[in-house]
Image: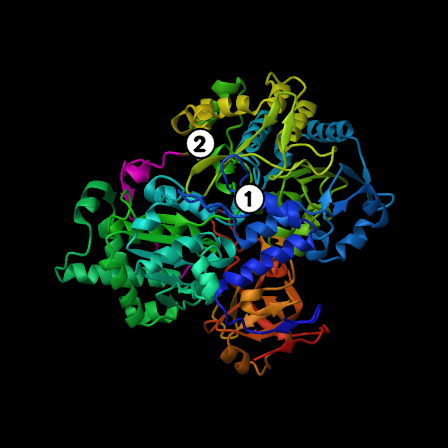
Amino acid sequence: MSKKNESEFKPYHHPAGGWGAAGATAKVLMEQSVLVKGSRGLLAMNQPGGFKCPSCAFPDPDHRKKLEFCENGAKALAHEATKARLTREFFAQHTVTELMEQSDYWLEMQGRLTEPMCYDPATDKYLPIAWDDAFTLIGQHLRSLESPHQAEFYTSGRTANETAFLYSIFVREFGTNNFPDCSNMCHEPTSRGLPASIGIGKGTIVMADFEHAEAIFIIGQNTGTNSPRMMTNLVEARKRGIPIVLINPMPERALIRFTEPQDIVQMSTFGSTAISSEFVHVRIGGDLAILKGMMRVLFEAEARGEDVLDRDFIKDHTAGLDALRADVMSQSWADITRISGISEEQIRRIAQIYIKSKATIICYGMGITQHQEGSHLVQQIANLLLLKGNFGKKGAGVAPIRGHSNVQGDRTVGIDEKPTQAYLDRVRDVFGFEPPREHGHHVVEAIEAMEAGYAKVFIGMGGNFARAIPDTERSYAAMEKLLLTVGIATKLNRGHLVHGKDALILPVVSRSEIIKTSAGEQFVTIEDAMSNVTASRGVFEPVSTSVLPETEIVCRIAMATLPDSKLPWARYIDDYSLIRDKIAEVYPAIYADFSEKMKDPHGFHLDIPPRRRVWMTPSGKANFLVMQGLEVNAVINDPAMLRLATIRSHDQYNTTIYSNNDRYRGVYNNRLVIFMNKQDREDRGLENGAVVALETYSDDGYRRYVDGLRILDYPMPRGAIAGYYPELNPLLPLDFHDETSGTPAAKAIPVKVVPSVASAAPIRIAG
């Protein structure tokens, strides 16, 4: 192990999981001084009567174990339950300017927020403010706007259903559909792309499908870091001999070999399971070529008279096959292999795995969605599944692997900048006001509105908006034009330091803490990535007496902003069952008898029509949709250009940095690194470990440049490099996004390597 604060690169050759994960869990509990408290919390995490993990959205298994958490879930809990406190004394000691100089990791390590704070421009510090005064300030700003559309209302995926629902109702009664949301930056192509294909923007599998699958494909997703509990399903599948095909530009340790920490035999014998049966080392942006190559293999076999397509399913349930066939067969193998970087032989091999399987699951992550044609790329995955009828049967379907633990639920209950007219009609009928009908802003549009000086107020329901969004310098400047910024959060982050003229930080009760009101103890509900809704009940006392539940904060903002509202906001503060009753009224098809269903400790599944082979499309059919060509990003004809994928380390969750290490990739005490193909490095006359800068290819007049980056040789495809998010967000142009969804194309940023002018600490590179 490297010395403390010594930057080092030392390849990791052990299986993922196992004793490394167990040791990391114990270490983080001790670091946050919550070994006993944290251990007690872990026993309640993801259990009936307990709370949902504040980390990823992967579902609980049908048959839960006594311990249902992973290493990253333990980190999330430890940092949430930490003994460290951010008090008024801390803010008295630091100006905002000084805090901006600190790293994201340093800010995270300062601990939990304990009371509401208000920015004082005279001292450049945050000062304490009474809750009533904070709500009055918000109400005054919102009521003084010339138009409701001058306010932006952001939501983080960790916001529970009850809070998100009331937030959406308040904002619509206020008069706008401006809902920039964290999903805009990750799986929005799923929400916008899949409905045209299968009638719904969600995954179609349930946990039990892993037990019946005959093949599993994982595309553009680092399971071992981003959804580690899914590794249990993959281990069990491999033990059954099920092929698992991994398609990714980076070979990820957990999908090579994995030791299940809860497997006593593997742990005691230092054993492991080989996960991927086939690794497809695709070039960045080459996934479409592979998908069309696989479909071409099927159509070629069909032309030879082989029975490879599900003809009955296609006839009864789909439309558009002929156009898809014509498009796929027009693609040459020379172009398919050139753009994908994969041989025809390997594409044919994995296509045969797909053909032989009677039930296939395709999982995908942001390696698919974060491209300029991400929404259309998602549709090509649906095309491949439709060809063999892989919907509505056991062991088959599409599985977008979501990030935040309720990012899907937030969208389900109303956080949507493009609501349907039918939904708005139900809101009108249930609540008695006329909601706005025009579309609102997604993330990129919200930033553009700030930059133009039109947006005046930003309210962030959780998250770290300023750090998560693209085009960092440009976006910071846009946010600083605002008249009011409000951060509703558990911890201090960069988003509270990039602020408007007035600024508030409002501390909240965390997921793992008890919510007590005058009506008694309350619980909230969470929807996971497979559309199962479960209850979440905290087990710890709140961090201080001066923090409030998110739901109460929303209600009190509404009361301060809409004094003439007829809605019973005060009653919603006390009794969350009343909120669930209203959710059921607005969404009778999926949330009927909501309160009654929540008596089941395992929750219930929302109805997903494709599971029943019902297609909520205009034609009533699932649609094969054509995407022209093989490119998913704009082509830049310059041999010096590289495609940069921004990635997370193993010790971070979204913008939350737990340490400066990335164990599985062998990086310690450094986040300013880029992973680069050795031949690409040598072609540029650079040494392994050299310090360079990256600059974005762009013709919009902005220079996007990050210096002080250490090159590390890594098995990347030619023309591809990777580096950490959010440090490399300054390289991602605001207008480099999927036009359908607005999602930034963070997995294919066009950059070039340029000389560094920065000095960097030395790094030790071990063999």
Residue 609 in the magenta stretch? The answer is yes
Compared across the picture, whether 83 is left or right of 149 comes to right
Residue 617 in the magenta stretch? The answer is yes
Q: Secondary structure at mark 1?
A: helix
Which quarter of the figure is the N terminus placed in? bottom right
Q: 141 and 330: which one is in front?
A: 141
The residue type indicated by label 2 comes to Thr
Q: Position of residue 220 (x, y in %)?
A: 44, 59
Q: 142 and 404: which one is in front?
A: 404
Q: Quadrant of residue 345?
A: bottom left
Residue 644 visible at all:
yes
Q: Nearer the viewer, mark 1 or mark 2?
A: 1
**In the picture shown, does residue 413 fall above or below 359?**
above
Which secondary structure type mostly characterizes the magenta part of the structure?
A: loop
Q: Which mark is residue 43?
A: 1
Q: Residue at the location (24% across, 44% down)?
A: 319
Q: Secondary structure at mark 2?
A: loop
What stretch of residues is rendered in magenta? 605-634
Q: 380 and 330: which one is in front?
A: 380
Q: Position of residue 514 (x, y in %)?
A: 63, 33
| Residue at which label 2 appears | 420
Q: Position of residue 161 (x, y in %)?
A: 53, 33
Compared across the picture, whether 636 is left or right of 556 comes to left
| In the image, farthest residue toward the left | 305
**In the picture shown, does residue 60 fall above or below 722?**
above
